[in-house]
Every structure is written in structure tokens, then in C-alpha cells.
Amino acid sequence: MLELQNICYEVDDKNENKDILKNISVKIDERFVAITGPNGGGKSTLAKVIAGIITPTSGRILLDGEDITGLNITERANKGISFAFQQPVRFKGLTVKDLVTLAAGKDINVNEICEILSEVGLCAREYVDREVNASLSGGELKRIEIAMIIARGTKLSIFDEPEAGIDLWSFNSLIKVFEKMHQVINGSILIISHQERILDIADKIIVIASGEIQTVGTKEEVLPVLLSQAGGTEATCKALADKF
Amino acid sequence: MDAIEKNLLEQVADIHGVPEGAYNIRANGKSAGRNVTANIDIVTKEDKPGIDIFIKAGTKNESVHIPVILSQAGLQESVYNDFHIGEDADVTIVAGCGIHNCGVDTTQHDGIHTFYIGKNANVRYIEKHYGEGDGKGQNVMNPTTLVNLEENASFEMESTQIKGIDSTDRVTKGVLKDGASLVVREKIMTHGTQFAKTNFEVELNGVDTKTNIISRSVAKEHSSQTFLSKMIGNNQCTGHSECDAIIMDRASVSAIPELTANHVDASLIHEAAIGKIAGEQLTKLMTLGLTEKEAEEQIVNGFLK
């Protein structure tokens, strides 16, 4: 279980203190938790705080009761936190196989790699030896990013807008990946998303705006409010796509 | 051959013991083994150090290994090897030089390799440079590769220097006739106070000639590198050169292109990118559980793979 206690994050913007995160306290112990809310509201910052990429100004982060606030990225990764970037990173020279093997943290054979790639909808044989460079499309990179998280199989997997930067066609098949992951995962998934179909499979939805938690609840509680704010079913896509 | 020499041989030629096919092993300035085949002859030069390698026209799928190893500190030599490749041949040539220097004097090997490649012949040339030793003496290698390509001939060179060479000044020149193609892939890593200079010069004289020069390098600590690429398009041709460097610590890297088009249908491109390892690459690998140092190693190894 992940617990955030009074997380604050301030930055110095043109000599003015700007609060990016304001006193965020929440517990995450469900299997599938979605964070949503307008752009610039602090969602990605919060994910980076959990992964150790950003150090909060104050507050505590507990993983299964252990205070991990002072741990760096590597230490948190080894404690069981995985993080899929919104913008996957490209590597000249490193192949899909290299990255999935590094993610697994041990030598895994090509069959195992292929199995993981198939799970994210990549035809494994074509991809195993591909370099993770500019020759791959945004959708392919996203899938490889998710494949790395599956290969790690940690108790907490964070995904920052897996739908960002991919076309609708790719998204439709990606959603199936998450639906399956929801069923089989051993730990918790924390996913930042604006997509109704992702929110729809969440056990809990957290709405963050202006650096604060606005609402926390089940999808039955939160989703109708979000949708009505967005102006009804027809406007849903727009509202969610425009990020409110 | 002792353990040190065997290790050098393995490093530069990926061979354990005696290679298959034709070979000539030069150890500490002397011949340490030679084998010729029905299609490949190797003859010692009379007028200067070096050998002539003759590959018969039409020779297919054969290889020649010509490794050089120096384990005697302070030895300095210039060696002239000429390769005469017959028409329609298709061969692989593996050269390479390994130095083990445990003394205080400079050990230096300057290999001047000249290729005369006949019509329609294809040559794959692999060259590895490696240095080691705990002495204060410098390991120096200044290879020169001169490639003359006849009509529709092709030459593909892979050059690797990733360890232990203190100073290198390498020159690679190509002269291409109609339809000929020259491809070079170079990998260099320097550290400490090492210096590496690579100088490419390609004359695209024939119609439909092609060249592609790709250099990937990593400069660490206080080392420095200079990459010069000169392409002269004298006919309808395409030329592309690319210098991609990772710079670390206090190192320095220069990339200097010189493109000259003397024909309206000459198309020449140079790309250069020099920069440190992207922070997000390190972060990504750290989220997989690697330390910053391990992440850096993986990125560098992948880049030079």
C-alpha cells in the first residue's frame, strides 16, 4: 500500500513561490487507481514525487508502512515502484530486448521477452532486436514502455498518461492491455489518464486540480460528476480529451 | 605465443589460436604465422616492412586475418600492407592491432593499408584497435587506410577502438569510380588524457557513387577527439557523413565537415550531434532499478554496440 501524507511541492518561479502540490494526502491500496484532472494540475508531478524523480518540499511517502521519502529513484525502484513515462525515452543503440531485460532485472530468454511484447500487442519477432530510437513510432514506444513495467512486475506500477501521443486506433488496443492488467496484476496500478474508458475500469478515482485533491471516490461516485461537469455524454470525449 | 599475446589476439581479431582460411600474424615486428589458400596469396614485401595480399578474381566467401600484436614495450614500427582484390571477389578481411605496454617508452604501430579493389568486388573490412598494460609508456596507433574502388566495387569498413590507445591519428581515404560504394562505421571511446583524431576523405569521381561515413564516439574524463570528414562530389553521387558523440566529464569533441560539390547532381550531407547523456535516459534506467553509474554504462555500451 502506498500512502502519501501532506505532500507539498513548491518551486521558485521568477522569485515567486509557486505551489505545484498542496498538502496531498491519500492512500492507494486498491488494484487500479486512476488520477485525473485538468492539465497543469499537478498529476505528473505527483507521479514523479512517488517515483523519486522529484523531491517534495515537505510531506512523507510510505510504501507498505515504510517511509521511503528519503530514498532515491533506484532505491524506490528496488522497493517495488515502477514508472512508465508520459514521453518514453529513446536510446540510440539499446534494443527492445536490452530494455526489457534490464527491466526484468535478470537474464530472460527470448521466448519470455516475446510473451511480454505480445501482451502489449507487439509482434515480438519484429521488435526484439529493434533499437529503441527515433525509428519507432509514438504508439510503439508507449507499448515498449508498458512492456518494461510488465517485465518488472512490481507491487506498484505508475503510468503517466499512457494514451498521450498515440492515435485512437492504437489506443483502442492499448485499453485492452490495461483491462487485462487489471485482472492479472499482483500489486496496484496507479494511472494518470483523461480517458473515460480507463477511468471506467478504475476501482478508485482521484481528481487533482490546482495542486490539490478535489475528489476521491469510486468511479460510481466520481465519474457522473466529472461527466456532468463536462456537459453530458456527447461532450465527454471533448471534455476528457481537452483535459477539462 | 604467451598468454598476453593470445589475449591481444583475441581482443583484436576475435580468434582463439589459429584462424581459419588465409592469415598472417605479426608479433613484435616479426611474422608469427602465415597461411595461404588456393585463392589468397600473401607475400612479404622486399623493400619495406609489410605484406602484399593477392586475392584472385571471383574468390567468394573467404576471409583473411592479418592481426598485429605488440607486447614488447618501446617497439615502434610502420607497416605497409597492400591488398589486391580481383574482380567479382567477395571477401572479409579482419585486421587489428593490440598493444600490451608495461614499460615506460612509447609503443607505436602505424599500419598503412592500401586497397586496390577490382570491378564488382565486395570487401568487408573489420579493424579493431586495443591497448593495455600497466606501464607509463604510451600506446600509439596511426592507421592509414587508402581505398581505390573500381567500377561497381564496394568496401564496407568497421573500425573499433574502445580501449587503451593513448593517441591515434587515423586517416581513411577513398577514391570511387562509377557505381562504387564506400561505407565506414567507426566506434571510438577515449578516456584519461587520450587523444583521437579521425580524418576521412572521399572522392566521389564516378557516376552513381555512394559513401556513408558513420562515427559514434564517447569521450570521457580529460580526453579529446577530432572528427574531420571531407567529401568531394565530382559527379552524380550521394555522400552522407554523421558524427554522433557523447561527451562526459571534462572531455572535448570537435566535428569538422568539409563538403565540396563540383557537379550539379552531387548530393552531400553531413550531420553532427555532440552532447552529454540525456538526463531522462539516466532517469528511465534508474526507474528500472539501475544505479546512476550502471545506467551510464548501459547507455554508453549500447551507443557503441
Image (cartoon, helix red, strand yellow):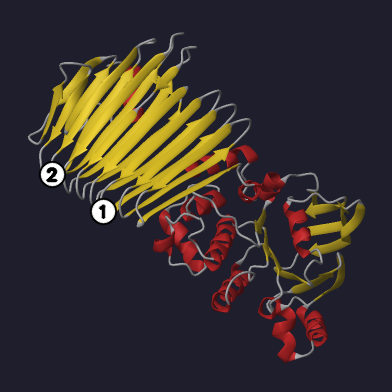
The N terminus of chain A lies in which quarter of the figure? bottom right
Furthest-right residue in this view? A16
Res. B249 in view: yes
Q: Residues within 10 Å of mark 2 (few under 14, many from 20)?
A: many
Q: Which residue is mark 2?
A: B87
**Residue at x-position 16% and y-position 30%:** B53
Front-most of residues A94 and B202: B202
Question: Dot 2: what SS?
Answer: loop
**Residue at x-position 47% and y-position 42%:** B257
Q: Is residue A166 left or right of residue B239?
A: right
The C terminus of chain A lies in which quarter of the figure? bottom right
Query: The disc numbered 1 marks a residue on which chain?
Result: B
Front-most of residues B144 and B134: B144
Question: Dot 1: what SS?
Answer: loop
Mark 2: which amino acid? Answer: Glu
Asked if A111 appears above or below A222 in the picture, the reply is above
Q: Earlier in the sequence, mark 2 or mark 1?
A: 2
Q: Is residue A244 left or right of residue B247?
A: right
Same subunit: marks 2 and 1: yes
**Residue at x-position 38% and y-position 24%:** B142
Query: The disc numbered 2 marks a residue on which chain?
Result: B
